[in-house]
Image (spheres, rainbow, N blue to C red):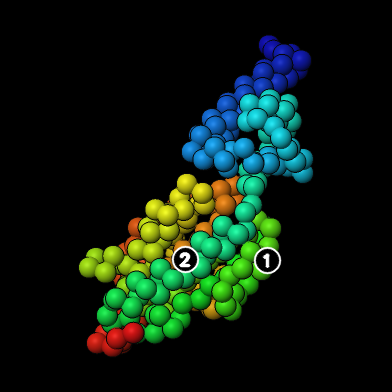
Amino acid sequence: MATVAQNLSVIRAAVVNLNAQVRKGRNDSLRDYYSHLPPAIQSRLTYSHGSQVYRDKTLGTFLDLINKRPIHMPVKFIGGDDNQLLAQAANDMSNLVYTRASTVRDTGQHVFSLTMYQRAVGQKTWHLIPGRVTASSLPERAIVSILAPVSYASTLEARGVAQGILYYAAKQLRSRYGKQLAVKYDYVSGASFGMGGGTFPRIQIGHYGNLRPKFQTPGRTAKRRSRGYAQVKGRSA
């Protein structure tokens, strides 16, 4: 019969093996994410592991350091911010959306509902941007978002002929800034912006390390919004 000491030894060995597997998976994921960043972004990254912040470290050195620490601590890349570039891209985002919307018929109140917000990474509250975006108005580690909070917005995005409005603009932004800034197209609950229910299309833009690029295909929420769109069909923006 195994002794208590033998059982504890087996458990310790199992824990060590599990931790090693978790570290390997985490390290591989970080290497993959890092490899897709432009060199200019890679050279300005700060690494955050739990409450510890590492600056001026290569990725390899950073991994060597955190592999000696508890594996449950969160890891983050903090991008080197250039708010001048982000402000320029945010204003381009607004112009692209309005220009695209002006070419699409039957948008109802879509154009007039388009709203831009900003928040800093770590903040839960989005703040309305009432006018043109400036570098000085953006907080450190800012993310800028634009959405159309009308009930039929998701239906408009899913219409194949129009290629969407926000979705089209997001693709144009990715083409212009994809190597310098992260662009994300997704759908968000109105409750996140204090608007009650509903799910609305959204574009987000921010620095790599602050925002992960992602494109969600339009159409997944369209069926839920089809009745709202029917009420405005035949009207022009």
For the N terminus, the quadrant is: top right
Q: Quadrant of the C terminus?
A: bottom left
- Element type at marker 2? helix
Tell me where residue 130 appears, x and y as whole percent.
59, 79
Residue 92: mark in rendering: 2
The x, y position of residue 12, in whole percent, is: 70, 21
Asked if residue 105 lies left or right of residue 176, the reply is left
Tag 1: residue type?
A: Ser
Depth check: 108 or 168 in front?
168
| Residue 90 visible | yes
Front-lying residue, 112 or 67: 112
95 or 202: nearer the viewer: 95
Pointer 2 local density, CA inside 10 Å: few below 14, some 14–19, many at least 20: some
Q: Is residue 67 visible?
A: no
Rendering coords of residue 33 (x, y %): 52, 38
From the top left corner, tell me how far across and down residue 75 is, in percent.
65, 41
Q: Amino acid at mark 2?
A: Asp
Q: Residue at x 26, y 69 (%)?
A: 162
Q: How many marks?
A: 2
Q: Which mark is residue 136?
A: 1
Cα–Cα span, label 1 and label 2: 17 Å
Left/right of residue 167 with respect to residue 39 in the rendered view: left
